[in-house]
Amino acid sequence: MNVPPKNPSETNREYAFRVISENIISLDIEPGSMIGEQEIATDLGLSRTPVHEAFLELSKSKIVDILPQKGCLVSMIDSDLIREARFLRITVETALVEDACELAKEEDLQELQDNLELQEFYLARDPGKLLALDNKFHELIYRICNKMQCYYMVSLMSMHFDRVRNLSLHSVKDLKIVSDHRAIFDAIKAKDPVAARAAFQKHMARFDLDWNIISREYKQYISDGSK
Amino acid sequence: MNVPPKNPSETNREYAFRVISENIISLDIEPGSMIGEQEIATDLGLSRTPVHEAFLELSKSKIVDILPQKGCLVSMIDSDLIREARFLRITVETALVEDACELAKEEDLQELQDNLELQEFYLARDPGKLLALDNKFHELIYRICNKMQCYYMVSLMSMHFDRVRNLSLHSVKDLKIVSDHRAIFDAIKAKDPVAARAAFQKHMARFDLDWNIISREYKQYISDGSK
DNA sequence: CAATCCTAACTAGTATGCAAGTTCTAATAT
DNA sequence: ATATTAGAACTTGCATACTAGTTAGGATTG
């Protein structure tokens, strides 16, 4: 497990949650593996308590499954849960990008623009950084629409989705994500909700194509029921 | 606080979460009041640990705000958070009722029908029971569409909304909820997604009218920023 | 009288210990 | 050799104890 240093402003519980989440999404903790509270607590230099609380939060999104008196099972890549996360994001964010056309102020557009330029910068140099920038781009849209509580709920479920998108950045060659974001940005800037909706749906539809590649390359991580 | 008996199948943590949630939604715990872990634990006959964990989960939806070393503040009725919960429900469930037209099987329709008949039965006799039946009706729609994980996320945020709907059942005379549900059901049964969408949006739009009445009658519970 | 400081009584965050349930192993019985 | 069983070594759920930070009230000082 990859253990970054603790940010002094976060509690031990938040630290544990952040580190475990990152390791699950990056697949440093493998889907289907068992992790124990004591084991993680030792790695992080904490007691079981904050780790236990982090596990509880993670279990709410079913990204881990707590088996009492047995351990904590990191979920396999589950197409049903990915479908749900994808449905939620498409549904919510499609509505948001339309609203953003009305609500985005000049400074919001500037932030989106700055984020996009970073994406374009790292596209050729370090595509691994794109996932974080992508998430930030989507977060900005929630922020513009004053829907940060929705963002928290959606992003918790999105972990299933993020874990697969992370694979996709490494195995899918044709990275259209950045140009998709550019199209969404242009539509918001032009205050054109019809174009924004279309650009966003095109962006999210792209994931369907990736799934075929991923499910072939990483089938050892994919739970049985999925196809 | 109203303390129902513990269901033997639930853990102490789940019991604490359920009891505190119900008391917040029913307003037996007043918006703006402070509650302590020890105080609730004593009322429930538990130690602080499961109550602490229940508070953590509640704080994720901002229905309570944990102030470290001070206590746990039950949120005032906050129009911004209600707006977010309402937005999320309208957006997600509008999409769901359309899908439900395709997905609902005969047994699903029967369950919806049974629920509706109970609603009609209690409408005249005990309207207090309607909130639970209403929630169940909406849950059935998530179930039909295989979106139970979305249901958990949405219902956690919906607590803000539920608390106000609870007021509305007591103060708003014209209870159209049940006939709204009937219209949604008829559209799903007729496999008519356009009618389902329209009926659902009419249902949710009704809440706008109630808000005017509630914000006048219960303004002592409403946080400052709202209008 | 007003302002300040100190202390005692609170709070939640975290560590630790115990209870109860699961799993794995190895010894025993057939 | 195989099946069974006893027990040791695990696990999480929960209770308890301790730490550190906040608050309220009274004594003290100006």
Image (cartoon, coloured by chain):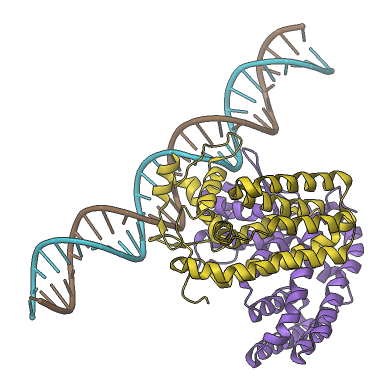
Chain colours: A purple, B yellow, C brown, D cyan
Residue B118 rendering spot, x and y as whole percentages? 71, 44
Is residue A46 visible to the viewer in this orientation of the structure? no
Residue B103 rendering spot, x and y as whole percentages? 88, 54
Left or right: A81 in relation to B86: right
Picture quadrant where residue B203 is located: bottom right
Query: Closest to the observer: B9 or B120?
Result: B120
Left or right: B104 in relation to D14: right
Query: Closest to the observer: B134 or A71?
Result: B134
Query: Closest to the observer: B47 or A19?
Result: B47
Is residue A214 visible to the viewer in this orientation of the structure? yes
Left or right: A227 in relation to A118: right
Q: Residue at x 63, y 58 (%)?
A: A20
Query: Closest to the observer: A212 or A38?
Result: A212
Residue B29 rendering spot, x and y as whole percentages? 45, 54
For the N terminus of chain A, the image quarter is: bottom right
Left or right: A171 in relation to A1: right
Q: Which residue is drawn at 85% across and 52% down?
A: A220
Q: Vertically, is A62 above or below A168? A: above
Picture quadrant where residue B106 is located: top right
Count of numbered labels shown in the rendering: 0
For the C terminus of chain A, the image quarter is: bottom right
